[in-house]
Amino acid sequence: MPKEWYISFHGGDEKVALNNIHVYSTDGTKLRKALNKKSLPAGVNLRELRGFVFGPDGNLYVVNAYFEYSEVLK
């Protein structure tokens, strides 16, 4: 896996821009968004990404927190 920074932002008015995990190179160049919102199950909205980790299976797991709708996404 290349050396990259995975960064989440909390809240804000720019929901499309902020409610995702953004990937940057080690020199600060923005590379991509880590999550493809179109691949999420119907009804799942990225709201407040509280934490994320790569599991032993290589998948990215994300905590999507929003009151009773909180869940862990793979």
Image (cartoon, rainbow, N blue to C red):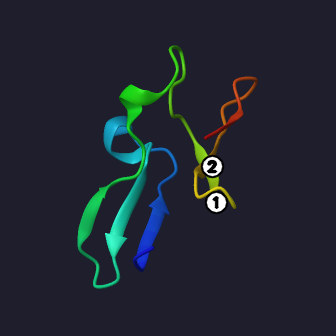
Number of other residues with Cα within 10 Å of mark 1, as a class: few under 14, some 14 to 19, many 20 or more? few
**Relative to 5, is 63 above or below?**
above
Image coordinates of residue 12 in percent, x first then y, are: 42, 44
Image coordinates of residue 52 in percent, x first then y, are: 62, 56
Q: Residue at x 66, y 32 (%)?
A: 66
Image coordinates of residue 23 in percent, x first then y, are: 37, 63
Amino acid on which the number 1 mark rests in the picture: Val
Return the residue found at the far bottom.
Answer: 27
Q: Residue at x 73, y 28 (%)?
A: 67
Q: Residue at x 40, y 75 (%)?
A: 4
Q: Residue at x 33, y 70 (%)?
A: 24
Return the residue found at the far front.
Answer: 57
Q: Is residue 31 left or right of residue 73?
A: left
SS for dot 2: strand
Q: Is residue 40 left or right of residue 63?
A: left
Return the residue found at the far top.
Answer: 42
**Disc 1 or 2, which lies upstream in sequence?**
1
**Relative to 47, is 43 above or below?**
above
The residue carrying mark 2 is: 61
Q: Quadrant of the N terminus?
A: bottom left
Image coordinates of residue 25 in percent, x first then y, are: 31, 76
Number of other residues with Cα within 10 Å of mark 2, as a class: few under 14, some 14 to 19, many 20 or more? some
Q: Nearer the viewer, residue 8 or 25?
A: 25
Q: CA distance from mark 1 to mark 2?
A: 5 Å
Residue 73, quarter of the rendered image: top right
**Relative to 10, is 28 above or below?**
below
The residue carrying mark 1 is: 53
SS for dot 1: strand
Amino acid on which the number 2 mark rests in the picture: Tyr
Q: Is label 1 in contact with label 2 (beta carbons under 8 Å)?
A: yes
Q: Nearer the viewer, residue 56 or 20?
A: 56
